[in-house]
Amino acid sequence: MDMAEKTLLIELFQPFAQYRNPFTFYYAQTYPLPPKSTIIGMLQNALNDWYGNERGIDEWWNLRVSVHGGFESVFWNYQQLIKATKTGISIVRFRGKPTLWNQKLPLYGFPVTSQRSPVLQQELFNGWLYILLKGEEEFLSEIKEALERPRKVISLGRSEDVVFPRRAEFIEGKKDEAREIGIKYPTYVRVPIEMLRKKEYPTYSIPIRVVFKNNGKPVKHKAEISVETFRDVDFRSVIYVGAWTFLKFSNKVSFEEYSFDGVQLKVVADEKASGWL
């Protein structure tokens, strides 16, 4: 490990959340925990660096992230959302009064279009999240300061899904190895299925990197976003390990354990399996 590399613990409270799973169409499913791309977006917003102009895109996405925690309950909300179709994209234009126009424009550069439709949306209620960031100490210190003294309302997911930072501090972990790892707080783990002795875990494909591009070049400002903008997304398959669950492997794997105020977070950190996204 680089001597300048540290681990930053972020503790958040979030009253409501919806981390949209883009692979659901007839209803809007939420991921059980925020994916890496959503967390990075929150941090970029906190530092006023939405498109990575200050630190650089690669420096943002090279941050390693491990997310833990959960929500008290799940409920359903009936909303109007923009859905992919083959009939056209719905745009509200003002000509004396709001009017809905189908313009048959492409959605994020793909040969599909979209329109507004009423959709059942799955939402999360009353959540506590523990996010571990691993990266260069100076960069993490900027993130820590932005969360301790926020200059704006911070959201995670949708703009209305505000979060309340409870803690941002550097933390040291200890390494160990085992065939069975007790997970108290739900988390995501990237692991080949053949490494697991127990295989009954939910699986998700989550976005870990999102870059908006015009003609192959990353967008540098919101004003550059247009109907020609391409949303370049990198997905990774992960398993979701629920609360009070044993993560069982065929052989011993390495993991890191972080403890604070009676809380224990365990992050798989093996050569082929990892809780770092």
Image (tube, grey):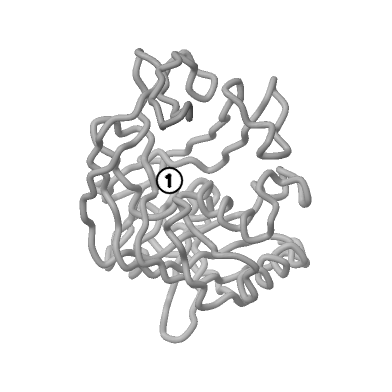
The one of 104 and 271 positioned closer to us in this rendering? 104
Work out whether residue 224 or residue 102 is closer to the camera in this orientation and state it. 102
Q: Residue at 23%, 44% (x, y): give it.
A: 78
| 59 or 50: nearer the viewer | 50
Secondary structure type for disc 1:
loop
- Can residue 262 be seen? yes
Task: Residue under label 1, please give it.
Answer: 191
Check the image and name the residue furthest to the front.
96
| Up/down of 263 relative to 255, above or below | below
Residue 266: give x, y in percent of width and height.
Answer: 45, 67
Residue at 66 percent across and 68 percent down: it is 146
Within-10-Å neighbours for mark 1: few <14, some 14–19, many 20+: some
Nearer to the camera, 190 or 232: 232
Q: Tally the marks.
A: 1
Three-letter amino acid code of the residue under disc 1: Val
Quadrant in which the N terminus is drawn: bottom right
Task: Give how far across and how far down residue 215 sits, in percent.
Answer: 69, 20
Residue 135 falls left or right of residue 187: right
Residue 59 image position (x, y, % from top left): 72, 49
Q: Please state the horizontal and vertical placement of residue 264, each as a whole percent of the image.
A: 43, 76
In the rendered image, the vertical position of residue 196 relative to residue 214, given as above or below? below
User: In the shown orientation, is residue 92 left or right of residue 120?
Assistant: right
At a point 45% along the width and 52% down the height, the residue shown is 157
- Residue at x 61%, y 70% (from the top left corner): 147
Where residue 20 sits, quadrant-wise, is top left
Q: Is residue 182 at all visible to an observer of this figure?
A: no
Whether residue 55 is situated above or below residue 237 in the rendered picture: below
